[in-house]
Amino acid sequence: MIQKLSIVVPAYNEGRTIHLILEKIAAVKLVNDIEKEVILVNDCSKDDTEAAVFRFMAEHPELNLQYHQHEVNAGKGAALHTGIGKATGEYLIIQDADLEYDPDEYNHLLVPILKGFADVVYGSRFMGSNPHRILFFWHSIGNKFLTFLSNFFTNLNLTDMETCYKLFDTKQVQSLNLVEKRFGFEPEVTAKIARIKGIRIYEVGISYYGRTYEEGKKIGWRDGVRAIYCILKYGLFKAK
């Protein structure tokens, strides 16, 4: 039975949108009256992200929102490490601070957990009939290639390894030795969670409201190269 869901939000220079995503999170009513715990980790933003978060907290004291600040920019993965370590809910989900993913879909992701079928649920941008913004051809090819390569070594049949929406049993993901500090988090956590004996992983189709680079998208080709390295490191060589 799930009494609390921890929502881990890494943020870097999201001052323009951070209040909007927090408003969406606050508005979501989880099934079975599950409590929300929001853990926001500001990875040493250079804009007014912190001020925007503090304004939101003052205006929404009813939301259980914990704020943590990195004194040095360490990367998205490092922010996730901090947030995962602070989580106290039975399950946790990762939420990007931009507006590409819709918190209204938390309840869809929870269904396989609540029905007793799953331990981990990934939200897939490449399955189902949910709306998807049409953007970059080569970016989508890169995502699918990385998912294929990851599946090759994990023996999973995921359609979207690089998705933001990953719903974990908190104790299981906290038990992993996660070391990747940037976007290598995705292939690393997938490889390591897949090694847990008897783990049950499901996918649920989700919406995707992607951003352009002009709108603030941060991931680039160097992160793709690092992802390949991480897939080989944690998949082929089973690095700890």
Image (cartoon, helix red, strand yellow):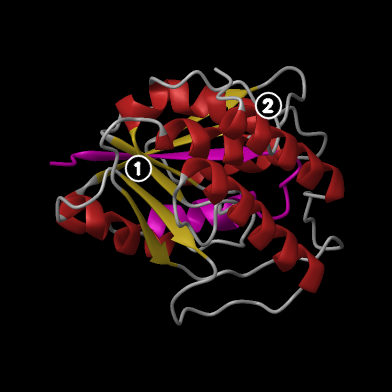
Q: In the rendered structure, which segment of residues is drawn in magenta? A: 1-27
Residue occupying the point 25% across, 36% down = 198
Marking on residue 82: none
Q: Position of residue 46 (x, y in %)?
A: 82, 34
Local crowd size for mark 1, using a 10 Å CA cut-off: few (<14), some (14–19), many (≥20)? few
Q: Is residue 54 above or below residue 32?
A: above
Q: Secondary structure at mark 2?
A: loop
- In the picture of the structure, the residue carrying the numbered disc 1 is 62
Q: Nearer the viewer, residue 209 or 20?
A: 209
Residue 151 x, y percent position in the rendering: 53, 50
Question: Does 80 appear in magenta?
Answer: no
The correct choice, above or below, for 233 with respect to 149 in the image is above
For label 2, the crowd category at 10 Å Cα-Cα, with few meaning under 14, some 14 to 19 and many 20 or more, is some
Left or right? Give the position of 218 relative to 30. Answer: right
**Is 202 drawn above or below residue 70 in the view shown?**
below
Question: Which quarter shows the C terminus?
Answer: top right
Q: Which of labels 1 and 2 is toward the front?
A: 2
- Residue 107 in percent (x, y) is at 30, 60
- Contact flag, marks 1 and 2 (Cβ < 8 Å): no
> Residue 24 at x, y = what percent?
47, 59
Q: Quadrant of residue 175?
A: top left
The local secondary structure at tag 1 comes to loop
- Residue at 59% x, 29% y is 234
> Which residue type carries mark 2?
Lys
Q: Amino acid at mark 1?
A: Glu
Q: Which of the 4 quarters of the picture holds residue 214?
A: bottom right
Viewer-proximal residue, 104 or 208? 208
Out of 34 and 231, give the one closest to the viewer: 231
- Please name the residue that numbered disc 2 is placed on: 181
For marks 1 and 2, give the CA distance.
Answer: 32 Å
